[in-house]
Image (cartoon, grey):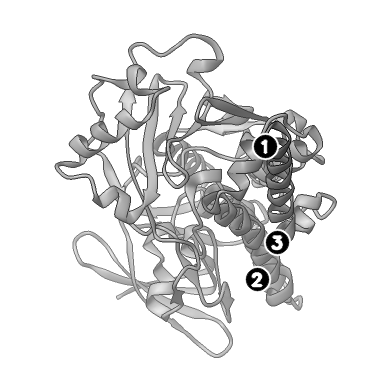
């Protein structure tokens, strides 16, 4: 069996794996990046958050991405029962980037991966991790298999698992645990828009809320393709019968705003369904490894948090692995696990309160409260570790409190009118 030796093995060449590999390679470490699929390949998670931009920049990937001309995302629009809530990232609480991108992930991920190859990073496609053995000191031997079934091994001092939905180490090490979020699913595809509206209407990402628990995403890309998809309780999606295309076409009738825009357009591919997508793990690191991105936690697509957490975890794990390889003591529990869990808990609150209706109540209440809106906008931009933001620091109670105040205000108004 062929053997190779590296400082860090990175599993998965999505945004998380590429950020980790780029940072470590730039820092002078011997890294190997293995990817099960061939690129370009389709994957979901097409709306980014501003907080990721600094990660791409620090990893040395920002310039090559800027050259691709992706659709600029300056905020997000939420719609429900004729009421529109627009979030503008330039009006968020706190410092940080005030824009990001909407991206066809096949092209976006491939752009990063190919830029790594051009710089000399050892990146191998169509290699599947089939086994991992860790020694007491954290060194590992990973067995990989190519498309022809040939096995080889990689000796590494550290592993960063950025395998996304493949969840390689959680699966091999038995780290999966049930998510505390509701069981939701999504059904989605791409369309080539022949009649896309001019101006902002044709470019803005929108979440069209058709019932309290069911919503449609519309994500336009700069290449004329638009991603559309429904999200809702798994039982709701299963209530529609027929082929995936027939089901999505029927669901589109729920959207008063978008039905005419997309009616009759052919789907670029048969709609894809992901059931019960929320995932969790029992631990985010171990002796000799760290989990990043969807291989660690995946919450819900409603606030586009997936890539933001993936790149935050990637950059932090890469920096900590580099320090550990230099012989420094690294506190993975405090600096990595606790840090990531803090951010996950903030976004989890917002996901849960979205589906309880409390957050929707704040979004669509009129008149809007500008201060509350800018603080929530800071969260939606991905700055979920900014403790100067009350809606981060007090996330557990503040959303509920504001929703309760709105209820009291509405009750008072109704009793007065009566």
Residue 52 x/y as whole percent = 63, 44
402 is higher (above) or lower (below) than 267 = below
Q: Nearer the viewer, mark 2 or mark 1?
A: 1
Label 2 crowd (10 A; few <14 / some 14-19 / many >=20)? some
**Residues at discs 1 and 3 in contact (Cβ within 8 Å):** no
Would residue 42 be seen by someone viewing this image from the given angle? yes
- Mark 2–mark 3 distance (CA, rounded to whole Å): 19 Å
Q: Is residue 309 above or below residue 381?
A: below
Quarter of the image holding residue 241?
A: top left
Q: Nearer the viewer, residue 66 or 294?
A: 294
Report the quarter where the N terminus lies. bottom left
Which label's residue is closer to the chain start, 2 or 3? 2
Q: Which residue is mark 2?
A: 337
Spot the residue most to the front.
Answer: 418
Which residue corresponds to mark 1? 414
Q: Is residue 132 visible?
A: no
Secondary structure of the residue carrying numbered label 2? helix
Measuring from the top left, give residue 219's x and y in whole percent: 46, 30
């Amino acid at each position: 069996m062929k053997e190779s030796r590296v400082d860090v093995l990175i599993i998965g060449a999505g945004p998380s794996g590429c950020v980790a590999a780029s940072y470590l390679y730039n820092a002078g470490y011997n890294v190997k990046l293995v990817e099960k699929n061939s690129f370009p390949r389709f994957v979901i998670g097409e709306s980014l958050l501003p907080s990721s931009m600094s990660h791409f920049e620090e990893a040395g990937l920002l310039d090559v991405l800027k050259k691709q001309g992706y659709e600029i995302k300056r905020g997000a629009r939420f719609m429900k029962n004729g009421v529109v809530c627009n979030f503008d990232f330039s009006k968020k609480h706190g410092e940080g980037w005030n824009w990001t991108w909407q991206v066809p992930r096949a092209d976006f991920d491939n752009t990063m991966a190919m830029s790594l190859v051009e710089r000399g990073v050892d990146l191998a496609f169509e290699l599947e991790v089939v086994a991992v053995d860790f020694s007491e000191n954290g060194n590992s031997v990973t067995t990989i298999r190519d498309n022809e079934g040939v096995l080889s091994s990689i000796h590494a001092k550290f592993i960063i698992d950025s395998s996304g939905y493949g969840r390689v180490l959680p699966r091999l090490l038995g780290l999966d645990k049930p998510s505390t979020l509701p069981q939701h699913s999504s059904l989605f595809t791409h369309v080539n828009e022949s009649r896309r509206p001019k101006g902002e209407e044709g470019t803005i990402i929108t979440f069209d809320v058709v019932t309290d628990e069911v919503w449609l995403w519309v994500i336009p890309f700069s290449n004329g393709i638009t991603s559309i998809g429904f999200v809702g309780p798994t039982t709701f999606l299963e209530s529609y019968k027929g082929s995936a295309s027939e089901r999505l076409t029927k669901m589109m009738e729920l959207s008063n705003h978008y039905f005419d825009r997309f009616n009759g357009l052919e789907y670029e591919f048969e709609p894809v369904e992901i059931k019960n997508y929320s995932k969790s793990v029992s631990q985010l690191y171990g002796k000799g490894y760290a989990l990043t991105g969807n291989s660690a936690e995946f919450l819900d697509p409603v606030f586009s948090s997936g890539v933001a957490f993936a790149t935050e975890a990637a950059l932090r794990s890469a920096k900590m692995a580099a320090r550990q390889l230099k012989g420094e003591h690294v506190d993975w529990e405090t600096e990595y696990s606790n840090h990531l869990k803090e951010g996950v808990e903030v976004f989890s609150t917002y996901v849960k309160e979205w589906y309880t209706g409390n957050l929707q109540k704040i979004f669509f209440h009129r008149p809007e409260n500008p201060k509350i809106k800018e603080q929530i906008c800071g969260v939606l931009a991905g700055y979920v570790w900014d403790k100067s933001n009350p809606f981060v620091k007090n996330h557990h109670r503040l959303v509920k409190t504001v929703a309760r105040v709105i209820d009291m205000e509405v009750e008072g108004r109704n009793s007065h009118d009566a």
